[in-house]
Amino acid sequence: MTVQVNPEESRIAALSLPSADRVGAEFKRLGHWLMSRVFPPMLVLGVLLLLWEWLCSQPGAALPAPSVMLADTWELIVNPFYNYGGNDVGMGWQVLASLERVAYGYTLAVIAGISLGVLVGKSTWAMRGLDPLFQVLRTVPPLAWLPISLAAFQASHPSAIFVIFITAIWPIIINTSVGVRNIPEDYRNVARVLRLNGYENFTKIMLPAAAPYIFSGLRIGIGLSWLAIVAAEMLIGGVGIGFFIWDAWNASQISDIVLALVYVGLVGYALDGIVGFIGRRVTRGTAA
Amino acid sequence: MNKRYLSIEQVDKTFTRNNTETHVLDKVNLSVAQGEYIAIIGHSGCGKSTLLNIVAGLTSATSGCVILDGKEVNAPGPDRSLVFQNHSLLPWLTVYENVALAVNKVFKHTKTSAERREWVLKNLEMVGMSHALTRLPSEISGGMKQRVGIARALAMEPKLLLLDEPFGALDALTRAHLQEEVMRIQNELNNTVLMITHDVDEAVLLSDRIVMMTNGPNANIGEVLDIKLPRPRSRIELAEDPEYNHYRREVLRFLHEKQKKVETIGARAAVGPTKEVAKSAAQR
Ligand SMILES: Nc1ncnc2c1ncn2[C@@H]1O[C@H](COP(=O)(O)OP(=O)(O)OP(=O)(O)O)[C@@H](O)[C@H]1O
Ligand SMILES: [Mg+2]
């Protein structure tokens, strides 16, 4: 039974394959990672799907079971980028249209939010004047801005962008101003001893020192934007994942709605991950 | 040599907060020659940092003035570089970048970028930090951070180097090591230095003159002690040296007998006795 390995031979094998151990270790680590990080969510997901399948295949169930849903939406799943003109385009296009609106609104919110945040953080007068206003306005629900912006812009596209802007800007302003106000005295002294000018002080001390705060604002902001766009699109129509959901509801295609929710969730998760990733890169690991 | 390279003249400082005034410094006068190494010693809270910050220009004096090399100081500037007690490196910059930030700003017009790079590397080498150029401050030890802080301060080629308890937060061995390095660098560059310290040995070992401050509020310079020990100094040889021990004793006597720390039950209670002691100390 026992296999006698010639010690000489095994040493030669080890010499000729120096990385065999390392490869083994890598595989082990990968296996460990799969077991500890990928397996549990997969298991939970599987159990939930089974439960859903079981519940919705009872007679008289109002919602489709996953298997039914998959069959219903198979065309949409395998074909995300078809284009039959008008609103009848693939899910990929719908998501991209929504993302484009978010990109515009969010970019504007980032620029305006960081500038205002720095102003409020730097100037006590600006803080006293603007802070109460911000505190009140930030509690207004995103959709409440929609009628006003429709009235002001007279068009749905800029209105949707405005809603994104106004939703995302508050956490950015507030976090930036807190970050700027909390810059340690020491860092400011470094700037003063070196006689950095306003621009250098802004780019070399203020922004990096406040970056962890700014990025947590940006992260909250992107999440809120994505929440708002889906709701706003339901009201304004056109191409976009929000209107797709509304359209599917009107056509009683519950399966399409479920598919759209999966898309919305995954895209939101990805957006959050991207902003978090950029934050970690920019702040060299100090931002969450 | 200019005996009054730096002069602190009649500097008074009163902090006002919520209608309560704290008179921290009371008519402080001091002249420092070029290349001199001054140690400032005194009990905690007497106003040493306040005095240093006034010289740095980070705080303004309530009255009186500071003159450095014939010019009045009223704002911070790179001709007076500081090493803070808590290093104050920028945590988002690497060791190299922290020094380079200062060098690139100070020598923007006087050195080419290659020369500046060379200069950053030279200063980091001087404090023995060449091996960690790309590390972030969070990745190096406290002693290493302090060295980078010193390199940054030296790299600015200041007229005056201001050290606020530069080794206060370090363990005894690291502290001794850095003291040696500062002595060696001082020998080489002959900087004018103002150093705050709590450590009597450090003061005697490093300085040419020890300035002893009375207890606050209304702190003042109580005594000034000339340290006439030859350089280079070695801590091991000096341990047996009667002169060295005499200086130590003088400082200890000042701190623990003449300026015995009155535990401040309220700052006001300490005003009376402290002022008396300050006067008697000044008269001696
Ligand atoms: N910004 C300020 N406002 C009001 N009081 C201050 C301010 N800064 C310092 N003080 C007071 O001035 C006094 C001297 O402070 P300082 O920091 O100069 O002391 P120090 O001698 O450096 O003490 P330590 O050795 O503990 O560092 C203290 O009593 C402190 O409370
Ligand atoms: Mg101090």
Image: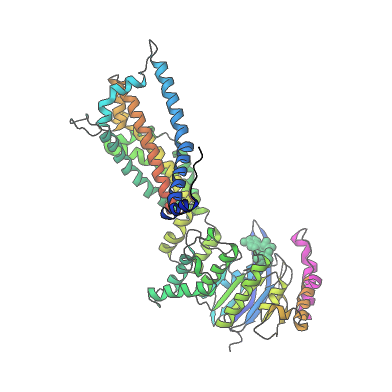
Image coords of residue B102 (percent x, y): 47, 69
Q: Residue at x 30, y 19 (%)?
A: A252
Image coords of residue B95 (percent x, y): 49, 65
Is residue A125 at all visible to an observer of this figure?
A: no
Where B229 sits versus B203, above or below? below
Where A209 sits versus A97, above or below? below
- Residue B274 in magenta stretch: yes
Q: Residue at x 47, y 43 (%)?
A: A28
Characterize the magenta stretch by its predominant secondary structure: helix
Asked whether A92 or B110 is in front, the reply is A92
Asked whether B121 or B243 is in front, the reply is B121
The residue lying furthest to the top in this view is A59
> Residue B212 occupies which quadrant of the picture?
bottom right
Image coords of residue A144 (percent x, y): 38, 32
The residue lying furthest to the bottom in this view is B1
Q: Residue at x 45, y 29 (%)?
A: A43
* Magenta-colored span: B256-284
Is residue B221 at all visible to an observer of this figure?
A: yes
In the image, is A210 to the left or to the right of A63? right
> Residue B227 occupies which quadrant of the picture?
bottom right
Image coords of residue A30 (percent x, y): 44, 42
Q: Quadrant of ligand 2?
A: bottom right
Where A16 sits versus A93, above or below? below
- Residue A134 in magenta stretch: no
Q: How is the image coloured?
A: rainbow
In the image, is B193 to the left or to the right of A116? right
Image label count: 0
